[in-house]
Image: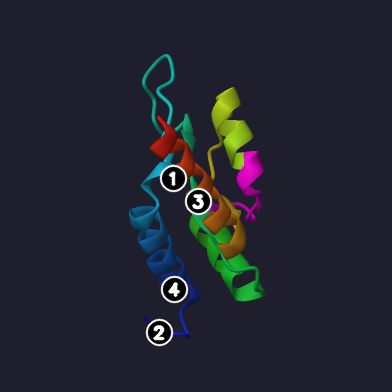
Amino acid sequence: MHASNPAVGLTCVVGLILAAAGPVVAHDQGTKGDRASSQRVVMQCGTDAMTRRAFTREHGAQPVFVTAREVQAARASGQVWTAPRCMTAREHARLVQTMSANASVR
């Protein structure tokens, strides 16, 4: 990974986060089964300007940061979005911990 290319760094971090946090990535099937229009993806993002520019370039929108609680509420209500949402490392850890605890109770 080269520090001079923020898109590469963001992509690598996203890939690792998504691979390690399967429960964070959820796809809801719409009535037509169109996955692109009915996804809810959350990834860990940095808050620095370089990461924000890379995110905007890759996803066509400014990053929107959410909390673990907001992700859980969106999941419960069936809310979806077209661009991935971001969360800080701390919020991501909270989300993974909560989802793991919920899974172990079931």
Mark 4 falls on what kind of element? Answer: helix
**Residue at point 43% right, 67% down?**
13
Which of the 4 image quadrants contains residue 86? bottom right
User: Which region is colored magenta?
Assistant: 59-70
The amino acid type found where label 3 is placed reads Gln
CB-based contact (under 8 Å), mark 2 and mark 4: yes
Dot 4 alpha-carbon crowd within 10 angstroms: few under 14, some 14 to 19, many 20 or more:
some
Which of the 4 image quadrants contains residue 103? top left
CB-based contact (under 8 Å), mark 4 and mark 3: no
Mark 3 falls on what kind of element? Answer: helix
Dot 2 alpha-carbon crowd within 10 angstroms: few under 14, some 14 to 19, many 20 or more:
few
* Residue on which the image places disc 4: 9
Does residue 101 lie above or below 77 as drawn?
below
CB-based contact (under 8 Å), mark 1 and mark 3: yes
Mark 1 falls on what kind of element? Answer: helix
For marks 4 and 3, the one nearer the N-term is 4
Does residue 106 lie above or below 89 as drawn?
above
| Extreme-left residue of the structure | 19
The amino acid type found where label 2 is placed reads His
Which mark is nearer the camera, 3 or 2?
A: 3
State the CA–CA distance, disc 3 to disc 2: 31 Å
**Residue at point 37% right, 47% down?**
22
The amino acid type found where label 1 is placed reads Ser
* Residue on which the image places disc 3: 97
User: Is 64 part of what is drawn in magenta?
Assistant: yes
* Residue on which the image places disc 2: 2
Q: Is residue 84 visible?
A: no
**Residue at point 62% right, 66% down?**
52
User: Is 94 part of what is drawn in magenta?
Assistant: no
* Residue on which the image places disc 1: 100
